Image (spheres, coloured by chain):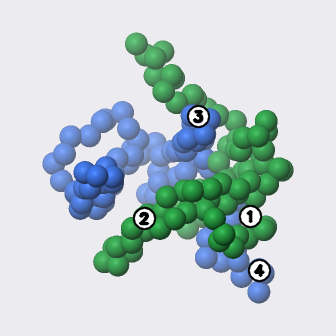
Chain colours: A green, B blue
């Protein structure tokens, strides 16, 4: 890809346009490349506790940091209920 | 709406199907009703610090709790940079 990126952003998802619906404004992109700053990596993988991503609350119009420490492992945590 | 809901879920978004694309499996629903347990409300509004929503990390396959305390106010935090 040769798209310009914000150098200040620790992570960038470069996408190719897949579809755009003018009626709904829904836009889909296929992720074709991910760039990440060394400061947010651990063993070459993006580390949530270093990236500190935020989530948007559309009710209160506030941003909230996502905890770095996982609360559960997907796909396996449910097996404790079997 | 008259759809069945899981009584154990503190919040339920009841949706009406807007569109479904068999090729991509993309499904859109229009939220027509929100039910919330009293235990996650503050002054009648859903309180993130009580709800403790989780976010999914598709790289590490882990779930992460979203912090209840906001880190910034949307739409107004940028005005400090003017």
Would you name the residue on which mark 1 appears? A9
The residue that appears at 71% across and 44% down in the rendered structure is A46
Of badges 2 and 3, the one in the foreground is: 2
Which of the marked residues, 4 or 3, is nearer the chain's N terminus? 3
Chain under numbered label 3: B
Would you name the residue on which mark 2 appears? A18
* Marks 1 and 2, how far apart at CA: 24 Å
* Marks 1 and 4, how far apart at CA: 19 Å
Chain under numbered label 1: A
- Of the numbered discs in the image, which one, if any, rests on residue B20? none
Rate crowding at label 4 as few (under 14), some (14 to 19) or many (20 or more) other CA atoms within 10 Å: few
Rate crowding at label 1 as few (under 14), some (14 to 19) or many (20 or more) other CA atoms within 10 Å: few
In the picture as drawn, the residue positioned furthest to the left comes out as: B2
Of badges 1 and 4, the one in the foreground is: 1
x then y, percent, for residue A66: 65, 48
Would you name the residue on which mark 3 appears? B62
Q: In this view, does A21 lie above or below B32?
A: below
- Of the numbered discs in the image, which one, if any, rests on residue B80? 4
Residues tagged by mark 4 and mark 2 found on one chain of the structure: no
Rate crowding at label 2 as few (under 14), some (14 to 19) or many (20 or more) other CA atoms within 10 Å: few
Chain under numbered label 2: A
Of badges 1 and 2, the one in the foreground is: 2
Residue A64 appears in the rendering:
no
In the picture, the quarter occupied by the C terminus of chain A is: top left
In the picture, the quarter occupied by the N terminus of chain A is: bottom right
């Amino acid at each position: 890809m040769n798209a310009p990126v914000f150098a200040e952003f620790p992570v960038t998802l470069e996408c190719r346009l897949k579809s755009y619906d003018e009626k709904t404004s829904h836009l889909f992109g296929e992720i074709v490349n991910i760039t990440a700053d060394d400061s947010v990596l651990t063993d070459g993988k993006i580390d949530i506790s270093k990236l500190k991503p935020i989530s948007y609350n559309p009710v209160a119009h506030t941003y909230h940091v996502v905890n770095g420490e996982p609360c559960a492992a997907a796909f396996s945590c449910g097996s404790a209920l079997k």
